[in-house]
Amino acid sequence: MTDSIGTTPRAGASPSFKSLPLLLLRLRAYLALIFLVVLFSLVAPSFLSSRNLVIVAEQVAVFAILGIGMTFVILASGIDLSVGSIAGLSAMITGYLISEGLRLPFVDVAVFAHVVLVCAAALAIGTLVGMINGWFITRLRVTPFIMTLGMLYVARGAAQLVSDGATYGDLSGQAALNNEGFLLLGTGRLLSVPIPIWLMVALALVAIYVTRRTVFGRQVFAVGGNERAAELSGVRVNRIKIGTYAISGFCAALAGLIIASRLGAANPAIATSYELNAIAVVVLGGASLFGGVGTIGGTLVGAFVLGVLSNGMVLVGISDFWQTVITGAVIVLAVVVDQLQRRVEKSMSERRARQD
């Protein structure tokens, strides 16, 4: 529930290096990132070029934003399989509003909104879909896995219905309609740094503050650690859970906007299977799928591990098929290591209890 990675030895305890394996397990994401950076810098000389590092950071931004939202859900002992579809839906809504405008009922008139309002509408719909997930899970007691799996199909189907499966191929907007500027979100730069990276950093800082400094953040950890105890201590568990899914929906919608802006087009298949990447970066970052354990910083590191691994394999020339196999193996290994850490911590706790 805290961000500390060390342990405080009790009086009279044996040498602290006994906890070294546990420390290494807790630092696994950082060690994996360092290992990958060193490895690919040796086998691919262009890996450490400034141009490639910017490319890696841009790729990581989308995974990190999705992962930040997923972190809140997993911390509260939930899961969200719909984030990829929500991203696709937000992209299609944006494409529709920019390309066709909002058609008013009963009159043959289309209203074209400013790009800021368009993005706000897409973000609001993504947040609403997340809240719907949370409401069904908390009020109707639908299992998170089943509810979000169902929403995965609902949101993806809705994205296809927006344009009957067609692609909105030009999202640059028109000056006459005052809806230009959307492409800056994914391709623009501020102080020579791509805007998606700024968005990732800003969102991460806000999320870190929320998890560490706010009542809501502490209650998220409490719900994930022991839901019944949190409820007995006065935490409104249902509201906290709905809030985490709303955050996840917002982050998914933002990721969808960035992808559509970067491509300059909106397709119903955008962000397909990205929910798996979102879960992967959270697990790689050291969060527990059982809830109550994890950090935003760890999720960022997990996103960089996945991004560096993907980029490095491309530079080395590994085939797409083997890239999929290796990425899957890394994710499985991360879960295995998480289970190993839990066993080591439990064993050490029991040993201390017997000594006391």
Image (cartoon, helix red, strand yellow):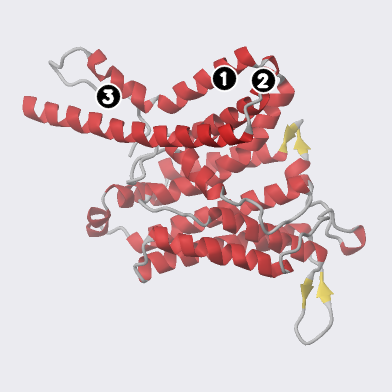
In x, y percent, where is residue 243?
45, 58
Using a 10 Å C-alpha cutoff, classify the residue at mark 1 as few (fewer than 14 neighbours), some (14 to 19) or many (20 or more): some
Q: On the picture, is 309 further left or further right than 141?
A: right
- Above or below, 64 relative to 176: above
Residue wearing tag 1: 37
Front-lying residue, 229 or 251: 251
The residue closer to the viewer here, 245 or 334, is 334
Residue underneath mark 2: 47
Q: Earlier in the sequence, mark 2 or mark 1?
A: 1
User: Does residue 79 sit above or below 355 in this rendering?
Assistant: below
Residue at 74 percent of width and 57 percent of height: 116
Q: Quadrant of residue 126?
A: bottom right
Q: Residues within 10 Å of mark 3 (few under 14, many from 20)?
A: few
Instruction: Tell whether 252 sits left or right of 16.
Output: right
Q: Is residue 52 above or below residue 153?
A: above
Q: Secondary structure at mark 2?
A: helix
Q: Tell me whether the residue at label 3 lies in contact with that at label 2, contact meaning CB atoms closer than 8 angstroms.
A: no
Q: Quadrant of residue 163?
A: bottom right
Image position, residue 205 (x, y; %): 54, 39
Q: Residue at x 66, y 38 (%)?
A: 198
Of the image marks 3 and 1, the number of the one nearer the N terminus: 3
**In this view, the mark in front (3 or 1):** 1
Placement of the N terminus among the 4 image quadrants: top left
Task: Please name the amino acid that badge 3 sits on.
Answer: Thr
Q: Are marks 2 and 1 in contact (CB under 8 Å)?
A: yes
* x then y, percent, for residue 248: 51, 53
Residue found farthest to the right? 176
Residue 194, percent from left and from top? 72, 36
For marks 3 and 1, give the CA distance: 28 Å
Q: Nearer the viewer, residue 56 or 204?
A: 56
